[in-house]
Image: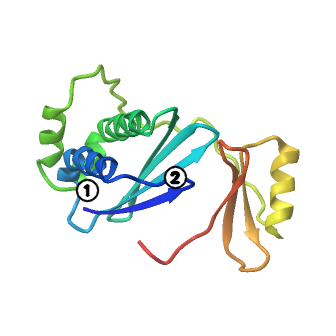
Amino acid sequence: MKITYVARKVNLRDNFKDRVERKLSKLEKIFSDAAEATVVVTLEKNRQTVEVTIKDNSMVYRAESTMAEMNDALDRVIDLLSRQLRKHKTRLSKRLRTGSIEELFAELPEEPVVEEDEIAVVRKKQIPLKPVSVEEAILQMEMTNHKFYMFQNADTGLTNVVYLRDDGAYGLLEPSAEG
């Protein structure tokens, strides 16, 4: 697994990078050799935010945690990723390396797992997609008091989504040709 580090307002020490590699090595058994992990560490007002994104075979796994210490935040992120993988175990075992997912869960401490037979869609809503600018889409999202808003980007003609991030900023999701 290729690991890329991004440090924002903080210098990453080698012992932290070694710790990341040790923690992610436990998870890399279930991913292909082409998997890429991005570790972003941000320092904001004496709080450390660690975000790990793993991309593999058009699947994306992401977890983020903010704590006083970056090692604690890293431990929490690895726990969150492990829970995501455990929750989607049956779906993952079909897509990823055969047998490797069972090996991962044999090593992890047992947690009570709520088995979900199917993912139920409880509401379906159709919305008209009209071309608007990103700024106009953000205004529409705020007016509807939602955390996201799907729209047709007037500049590109593609379907985009704007969303409200946990830090209060806005994000934009755009389609990509990459898988």
Badge 2 crowding class, 10 Å Cα cut-off, few under 14, some 14 to 19, many 20 or more, is few
Q: In the displayed structure, would residue 49 be above or below residue 106? A: below
Q: On the image, numbered disc 1 is attached to which residue?
A: 95
Residue drawn at x 28%, y 48% is: 92
Tell me the kind of residue under disc 2. Answer: Val
Can you name the residue that lies furthest to the top here? 112
Apparent side of residue 95 relative to residue 74 in the rendered image (left or right)? left
Instruction: Check if mark 2's residue and mark 1's residue have beta carbons within 8 Å.
Output: no
Q: Position of residue 85 (x, y in %)?
A: 31, 41
* Total numbered circles: 2
Which element is circle 1 on?
Answer: helix
Quarter of image, res 81: top left
> From what the image shows, is residue 47 above or below residue 39?
above
Residue 17 at what x, y percent from top left?
Answer: 31, 52
- Residue at position x 57%, y 54% from top? 9
* Picture layout, residue 112 above or below residue 148: above
Q: Position of residue 144 (x, y in %)?
A: 84, 44
Amino acid found under the numbered disc labelled 1: Arg
Within 10 Å of disc 1 (Cα), the crowding (few <14, some 14-19, many 20+) is few
User: Colour scheme of this structure image?
Assistant: rainbow
State which mark lies toward you, 2 or 1. Answer: 2
For the C terminus, the quadrant is: bottom left
Which residue lies under the disc numbered 2?
10
Residue 99, position as x, y percentages in the image: 11, 47
- What's the distance in space between the residues labelled 2 and 1, CA to CA? 37 Å
